[in-house]
Image (cartoon, rainbow, N blue to C red):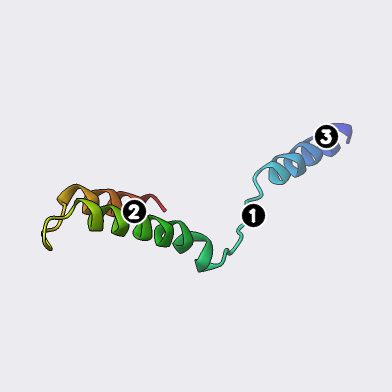
Amino acid sequence: MESNGLESQEKTEERAREIIYLRSYSKAIFFFPLFITTIILWIIQYILGESGKPVPWLGFIWTLVFFIR
């Protein structure tokens, strides 16, 4: 009988370790860093850009931030 009690206790402990908590976060948490990055890259584009020509590596940085977040 004791072995059954110990086995059930071990199974309960295993289940307790396997619990996954899902949290929902506001979309603002994910898009706020992208917004700040966009403003900074826009200022850099304004300074480095020659008469409206885009700077390609700035777009690459923006895309990286978008997919990382």
Q: Which residue is mark 1?
A: 21
Q: Tell me the mark number nearer the camera, choosing from 3 and 2.
A: 2
Q: Position of residue 66 (x, y in %)?
A: 34, 56
Which residue appears at 83% of the width and 34% of the height?
6
Question: Judging from the image, what secondary structure is the residue with disc 1 in?
Answer: loop
Badge 3 vs badge 1, beta-carbon distance below 8 Å: no
Q: Quadrant of the N terminus?
A: top right
Outermost residue to the bottom: 27
Left or right of 7 on screen, residue 30: left
The part of the image, by quadrant, that contains residue 14 is: top right
Q: Which residue is mark 3?
A: 6
Q: Position of residue 32 (x, y in %)?
A: 48, 61
Which residue appears at 15% of the width and 51% of the height?
56
Q: Which residue is mark 2?
A: 67
Callout 3 crowding tier (Cα within 10 Å): few <14, some 14–19, many ≥20: few
Q: Which mark, residue 50?
A: none
